[in-house]
Image (cartoon, grey):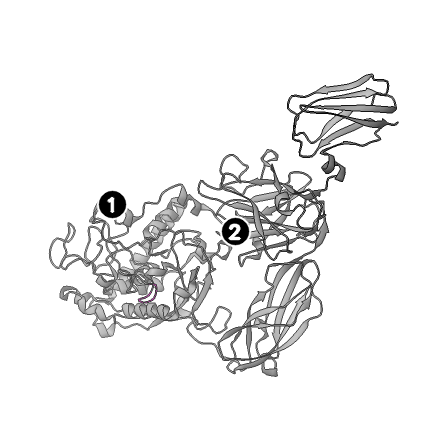
């Protein structure tokens, strides 16, 4: 995905409401945060040729629209009725707790849209008498989608648990599952509405106007959860559902009533290109008192601030004009991205079979790591889309293409309701596995629509190994034998992957892709096998090489290394680096990061205080936390333990090997006094080797070279600040 949204941290956005609030209005008023003008301008800055093409399309449209207006003038209202057009709506509620926006709240928003666009809104009584004759009643209506793009029954509402926020503009992450959002339903059949938390809490919503060359998945309306509907999470003064009325007006090619500028240009030359809306100098906020005049419309009745396309509070809005409703109808018949909605069957409920089970997803094991498991219990999330109550169904589990495990589940699931069913435990071995789960025989009969009966996924089972364990990812298997991979998002492709041609040593490494998958707060995970370590081990350490880059000043990926002594049931963090501490590339880069050879950095994690002498098994987990950053790589992971000789721990020092062929090592254990000198004497008292030290007090390994002396018995004299020790050794050939 394009990463331009990251620039929000680098280039502050000048939203229209922010500028105007600072320059022209009382800051105690809460202003309507429509971001449509801003996202359009950002799009044109990035694609200047698209602005030329857009303006040409709008000019062509304006000619058609003016012809419609000319033909309509003089016709009586009852002669100007067109066929009603019902637009199927799919509401994607994308929040950390999507249940905050209830079904009733969604319906309240649909009720407002239908009333406002039909001109049946109760507050139309507030339209000033001077504007009554201009009150428009469009033919547009809205329904919650009754079928999915695949033809299954639907409620028109889907809830997704996610911390992803809207970043208004092209490539808004709420519109893409790979970014932690949810992909649009077929935009030729549905008006997609994303209800979410906005990155700037002052933003209320936005859409793209028709005639742009944007990707199909970008089309639709994004709104803040607190400006949606009339109940529940909706907050005053934007709790009358008019944010949707306003923004969907943009979707059908209405400009702001004062024109196309961002409410920061005081001008009478700008226009909304609608002939029955008074020319207006700037936008209005809050709840103005009628009448209002300005430099463009100085005489009564003044400007039409109560129009849905101004910026006043929800309670102050109450009308579209006839010209605006004509403009929306003309847009439906003129723009290629709107016309297909005229023939959508999304509002038509599908014909229900008697016995039809829809498999929605594998609940478990779905792209997870099962640590040290020998079996698992499959779980499947299903929906009864048959007309008959579902009383029994078979759940069939296939692992790695083997023969299915079959269990008959009894239940009582009414039509169009969902539940989770479980199969019998299935044996499994260590490794990376594919899984397919499907249903058969609903109510003991053949499923009448089998195309929706199956779901697939992957999962890992970690195994056992001993120390030392070294992994450089040179084998083509990913994950490596007995290792596990997974992530905490719904995107399986976000799992760690093996890459070649990028490494600290050899030819491969493991990559955590935070460049293409902008899944803020989600984790990509790599688990080691459970490793056997001696209970008498004196140290347990983890070493690895990492390479990482930051995408921008504010992107902050993190690496956490954790250990478990109960085979992954619980983990304890022992290492964490993020942001500037994690990166190994000096400068930030918005490109897809591939490290240079000089950008690999070694890390050592000492688990000895937690493990050594206490536990005989350990598992290590590497966890990358997505912070809208860039790629992170790991290579040459080594997990090992060291058990010291008993003599060393007893005496505090040891000379090895003895006998020796010439290379002798002095090793200390918790040395308490400084070593001053070492001298080696032959059996007749001749000195053959000597070294003096100033700061050797805690040196664990000191080499003594006796390769050039004859075989025989020698005496090694160790001189400390408070004592002298003499050891006899034997030199052999």
- Which residue appears at 18% of the width and 66% of the height? 127
Quarter holding residue 500: top right
Q: Percent from the top left, x then y, of residue 203?
A: 33, 53
- Residue marked by disc 1: 22
Residue 590 position, x and y percent, is 49, 41
Secondary structure under badge 2?
Answer: loop
**Residue 310 visible:** yes
Q: Upstream in the sequence, badge 1 or badge 2?
A: 1
Q: Is any atom of residue 264 visible in this view?
A: no
Q: Nearer the viewer, residue 724 or 391?
A: 724
Indicate whether 367 appears above or below 409.
above
Disc 1 packing (10 Å; few <14; some 14–19; many ≥20): few
The percent coordinates of residue 491 (x first, y second) are: 54, 57
- The segment highlighted magenta reads 229-233
Image side of residue 688 versus residue 83, left or right: right
The CA span between labels 1 and 2 is: 37 Å
């Amino acid at each position: 995905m394009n990463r331009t949204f990251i620039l929000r941290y680098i280039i502050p956005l000048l939203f229209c409401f922010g500028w105007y609030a600072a320059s022209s209005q009382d800051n105690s008023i809460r202003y309507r945060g429509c971001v449509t003008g801003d996202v359009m301008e950002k799009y044109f800055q990035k694609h200047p040729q698209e602005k030329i093409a857009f303006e040409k399309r709008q000019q062509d449209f304006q000619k058609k629209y003016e012809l419609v207006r000319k033909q309509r003038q003089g016709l009586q209202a009852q002669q100007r009725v067109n066929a009603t057009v019902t637009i199927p709506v799919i509401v994607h509620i994308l929040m950390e707790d999507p249940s905050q926006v209830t079904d009733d709240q969604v319906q309240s928003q649909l009720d407002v849209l239908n009333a406002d666009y039909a001109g049946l809104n109760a507050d139309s009584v507030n339209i000033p008498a001077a504007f009554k004759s201009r009150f428009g009643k469009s033919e547009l209506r809205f329904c919650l989608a009754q079928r999915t793009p695949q033809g299954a029954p639907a409620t028109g509402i889907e809830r997704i648990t996610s911390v992803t926020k809207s970043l208004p503009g092209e490539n808004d992450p709420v519109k893409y599952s790979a970014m932690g959002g949810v992909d649009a339903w077929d935009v030729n059949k549905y008006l997609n509405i994303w209800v979410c938390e906005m990155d700037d809490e002052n933003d209320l919503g936005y859409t793209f106007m028709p005639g742009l060359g944007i990707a199909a998945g970008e089309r639709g309306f994004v709104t803040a959860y607190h400006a949606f509907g009339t109940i529940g999470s909706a907050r005053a003064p934007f709790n009358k559902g008019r944010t949707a009325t306003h923004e969907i007006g943009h979707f059908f090619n209405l400009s702001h009533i004062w024109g196309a500028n961002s409410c920061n240009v005081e001008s009478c030359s700008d226009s909304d290109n609608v002939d029955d809306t008074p020319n207006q100098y700037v936008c209005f906020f809050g709840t103005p008192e009628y009448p209002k005049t300005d430099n463009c419309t100085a005489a009564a009745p003044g400007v039409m601030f109560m129009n849905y396309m101004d910026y006043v509070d929800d309670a102050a809005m109450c009308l579209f004009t006839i010209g605006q409703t004509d403009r929306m109808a003309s847009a439906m018949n003129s723009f290629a991205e709107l016309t297909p909605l005229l023939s959508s069957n999304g509002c038509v409920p599908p014909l229900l079979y008697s016995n039809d089970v829809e498999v929605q997803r594998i609940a478990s094991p779905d792209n997870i790591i099962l640590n040290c498991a020998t079996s698992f219990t499959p779980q499947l999330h299903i929906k009864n889309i048959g007309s008959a109550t579902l009383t029994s169904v078979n759940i069939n589990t296939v692992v790695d293409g083997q023969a299915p495990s079959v269990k008959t589940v009894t239940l009582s699931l009414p039509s169009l309701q969902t539940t989770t069913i479980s199969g019998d435990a299935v044996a499994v071995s260590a490794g990376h596995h594919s899984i397919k789960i499907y249903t058969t025989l609903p109510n003991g009969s053949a499923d009448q629509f089998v195309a929706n009966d199956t779901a697939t996924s992957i999962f890992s089972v970690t195994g056992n190994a001993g120390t030392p364990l070294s992994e450089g990812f040179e084998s083509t298997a990913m994950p490596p034998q007995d290792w596990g991979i997974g992530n905490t998002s719904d995107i399986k492709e976000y799992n760690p992957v093996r890459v070649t041609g990028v490494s600290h040593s050899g030819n491969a490494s493991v990559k955590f892709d935070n460049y293409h998958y902008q899944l803020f707060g989600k984790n990509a995970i790599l688990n080691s096998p459970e490793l056997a370590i001696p209970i008498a081990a004196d140290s347990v350490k983890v070493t690895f090489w990492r390479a990482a880059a930051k995408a921008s000043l504010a992107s902050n990926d993190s690496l956490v290394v954790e250990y478990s002594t109960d085979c992954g049931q619980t983990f304890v963090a022992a290492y964490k680096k993020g942001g500037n501490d994690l990166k190994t590339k000096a400068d930030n880069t918005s490109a897809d990061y591939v490290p240079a050879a000089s950008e690999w950095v070694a890390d050592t994690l000492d688990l000895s205080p937690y493990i050594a002498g206490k536990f005989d098994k350990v598992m290590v987990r590497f966890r990358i936390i997505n912070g809208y950053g860039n790629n992170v790589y790991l290579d040459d992971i080594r997990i090992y333990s060291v058990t010291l000789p008993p003599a060393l721990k007893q005496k505090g020092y040891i000379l090895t090997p003895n006998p020796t062929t010439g290379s002798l090592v002095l090793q200390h254990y918790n040395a308490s006094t400084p070593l001053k000198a070492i001298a080696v004497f032959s059996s007749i008292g001749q000195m053959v080797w000597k070294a003096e030290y100033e700061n050797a007090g805690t040196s664990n390994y000191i080499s003594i070279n006796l390769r050039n002396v004859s075989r025989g018995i020698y005496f090694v004299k160790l001189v400390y600040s408070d004592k002298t020790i003499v050891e006899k050794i034997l030199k052999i050939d």
